[in-house]
Image (tube, rainbow, N blue to C red):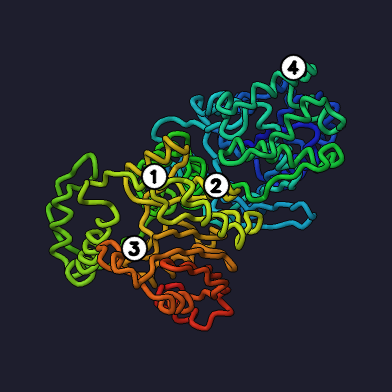
């Protein structure tokens, strides 16, 4: 058994390669370096006697190139692999032999190591961050071990495959590797990924702008990324290619779209005069709850909890499960933490709490039969004292929501109103909340999407929430709008996410107005504004309506918003209807914030 350090590199990364070798050379038995340039260009390697240099042609295929250095290993060798910008810590290098000896005793074939990121920002400042990402850079080689491309093109991003049953472990955080990169390098690599594979996880033709790029570069006689990179760095490029880059600035959402936008940033940084007057709209971001936003959330959960990038199946599966309502997005972290992978990597301590004995028949679908699970709960004191009261309250609340869900018609029916009826409200809103300052808006009580459509036409980026399958289907078919079904008392959005909120004949439907306003406060940024239009409380017909539990007088509405940390901007009330615009006050300027923070568990 030998310990072999292996790397695929290229001449431009020579200094980084040499630094990586300097750190680990004396702690391994062999060093394998793969590059496409002749050995004469790598004369500095002579200072490292254990280095074996191999010249291999580069073909714009990362998995194939990485497999070249695996071919230089023998069965049972331990491989320590790294990219040129990845340097192992002194603690890892010093203890490397002892770590591998311990892994051998325990039958472990893969060791995952933590990443410390060193990122040089656009202004030149270096940010150091200890991530929760653990990479497969240390493993026992066998003939079955190889890199395999993923996605459609399979030529940039890859997975490292091992023999079935390979045992893995996560190294303590005192062992790590440093990942060094700069802002410009990151943007250049985004362009590289888009050119070679369509961007993202080797998206290929999923990116409709990939084949047009290939056509342009073919016409220019640019056959490889090295040639394209040199051409871009020189500047004064072909007009058709420049127009392609300009169109990249408006891409946003999927991972491959974000890399296209970074491609625009890369070229603008190199040659600002060629793109003078063209800027990225900083308000561009995927709509909350949209497929690309949910997929990004899934990827972040994998990184933060499992310490790795999501595999293609896991990413697609969980994204689809959240979008179709099979699981709640907030439940994904606990689902990942209950996985065998998490337990194997990080270990799981026995949870605190009482023990309950029960016969448990295994159910292959849900692991534990539902009846057995309920019987176990009902034997516990915790269930009767803590869980059941909360379940009863939740049941009562769900029954109240049946009013909004149109339970009498099983959720059927469209809350249709003519578009023109919402135009005056949208114009008033736009006057007090111009789209360039209050761009991302939550439309609460969106009905069938009419008012969401009107707001969108005014230049706002709108997320609409409603109740009823028919409303959601109508909005999709009629206006091409994806509404979300959501309870306004429990808004499933991040803190400080929206610039404004829009409520037409909706506030009066709140069962707990103050709770609802507290939620509004949470999801709005400081200075975010709320426009509400409600019925006149002296309108007798409105008071008789069962689904209007909160028909309040003006001073009552204003008091509730004041107590939740809003100030009144303007009273827009007219005869037979009330209308107000409120603005969120920052926490440190709001005297009741300490109390609210305490009762809402934010302290």
Q: Badge 1, how many Cα within 10 Å: few under 14, some, many 20+?
A: many
User: Decide: marks 2, 3 in contact (CB < 8 A)?
Assistant: no
Residue that appears at 57% across and 72% down: 569
Residue that appears at 24% across and 44% down: 366
Give the spatial CA distance, label 2 vs label 3. Answer: 24 Å
- Per the image, label 2 sits on a secondary structure element best described as helix
User: Decide: marks 4, 1 in contact (CB < 8 A)?
Assistant: no
Q: Is residue 601 left or right of residue 15?
A: left
Which residue in the protein does label 4 denote? 218
Which residue in the protein does label 2 denote? 456
Residue that appears at 80% across and 18% down: 220
- Per the image, label 4 sits on a secondary structure element best described as helix
User: x and y percent of residue 468 in the render?
Assistant: 32, 47
Q: Badge 2, how many Cα within 10 Å: few under 14, some, many 20+?
A: some
Can residue 303 be seen here? The reply is no
Q: Nearer the viewer, mark 1 or mark 3?
A: 3
Can residue 16 be seen here? The reply is yes
Which callout, 3 or 4, points at the residue further toward the start of the chain?
4
Residue that appears at 18% across and 44% down: 362
């Amino acid at each position: 058994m030998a310990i072999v350090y292996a790397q695929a590199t290229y001449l431009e990364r020579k200094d980084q390669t040499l630094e990586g070798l300097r750190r680990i050379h004396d702690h391994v038995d062999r060093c394998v370096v793969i590059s496409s340039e002749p050995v004469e260009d790598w004369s500095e390697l002579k200072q490292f006697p254990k280095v074996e240099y191999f010249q291999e042609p580069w073909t714009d295929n990362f998995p194939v190139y990485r497999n070249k250095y695996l071919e230089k290993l023998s069965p049972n060798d331990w491989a320590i692999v790294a990219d040129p910008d990845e340097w192992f810590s002194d603690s890892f290098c010093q203890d490397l032999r002892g770590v591998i000896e311990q892994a051998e005793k325990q039958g472990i074939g893969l060791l995952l190591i933590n990443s410390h990121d060193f990122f040089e920002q656009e202004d030149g400042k270096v940010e150091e961050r200890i991530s929760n990402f653990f990479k497969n850079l240390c493993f026992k080689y066998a003939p079955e071990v190889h890199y395999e491309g993923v996605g459609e093109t399979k030529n940039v991003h890859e997975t490292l495959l091992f023999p079935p049953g390979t045992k893995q472990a996560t190294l303590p955080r005192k062992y790590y590797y440093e990942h060094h990169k700069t802002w410009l390098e990151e943007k250049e690599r985004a362009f590289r990924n888009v050119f070679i594979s369509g961007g993202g996880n080797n998206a290929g033709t999923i990116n409709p702008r990939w084949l047009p790029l290939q056509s342009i570069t073919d016409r220019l006689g640019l056959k490889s990324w090295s040639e394209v990179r040199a051409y871009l760095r020189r500047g004064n490029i072909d007009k058709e290619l420049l127009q392609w880059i300009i169109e990249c600035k408006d891409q946003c959402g999927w991972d491959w779209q974000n890399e296209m936008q970074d491609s625009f940033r890369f070229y603008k940084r190199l040659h600002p005069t060629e793109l003078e007057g063209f800027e990225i709209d900083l308000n561009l971001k995927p709509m909350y709850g949209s497929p690309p936003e949910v997929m990004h959330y899934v990827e972040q959960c994998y990184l933060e909890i499992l310490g790795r990038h999501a595999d293609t199946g896991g990413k697609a599966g969980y994204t689809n499960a959240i979008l179709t309502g099979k699981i709640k997005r907030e439940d994904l972290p606990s689902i990942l933490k209950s996985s065998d992978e998490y337990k194997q990597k990080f270990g799981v301590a026995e949870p605190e709490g009482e023990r309950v004995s029960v016969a448990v028949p295994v159910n292959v679908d849900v692991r534990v039969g539902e009846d057995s699970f309920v019987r176990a709960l009902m034997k516990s004191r915790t269930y009767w004292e803590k869980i059941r009261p909360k379940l009863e309250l939740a049941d009562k609340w769900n029954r109240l929501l049946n009013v909004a869900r149109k339970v009498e018609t099983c959720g059927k029916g469209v809350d249709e109103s003519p578009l023109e009826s919402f135009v005056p409200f949208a114009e008033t809103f736009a006057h007090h909340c111009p789209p360039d300052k209050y761009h991302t808006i939550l439309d609460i009580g969106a009905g069938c999407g009419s008012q969401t459509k009107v707001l969108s036409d005014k230049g706002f980026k709108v997320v609409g929430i409603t109740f009823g399958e028919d409303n959601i289907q109508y909005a999709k078919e009629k206006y091409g709008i994806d509404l979300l079904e959501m309870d306004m008392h429990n808004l499933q959005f991040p803190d400080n996410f929206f610039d404004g909120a829009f409520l037409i004949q909706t506030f009066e439907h709140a069962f707990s107005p103050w709770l609802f306003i507290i939620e509004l406060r949470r999801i709005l940024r400081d200075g975010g504004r709320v426009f509400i239009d409600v019925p006149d409380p002296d309108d007798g017909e409105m008071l008789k309506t069962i689904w209007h539990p909160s028909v309040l007088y003006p001073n009552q509405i204003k008091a509730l918003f004041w107590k939740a940390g809003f100030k009144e901007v303007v009273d827009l009330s007219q005869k037979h209807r009330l209308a107000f615009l409120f603005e969120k006050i920052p926490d440190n300027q709001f005297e009741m914030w300490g109390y609210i923070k305490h009762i809402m568990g934010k302290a």
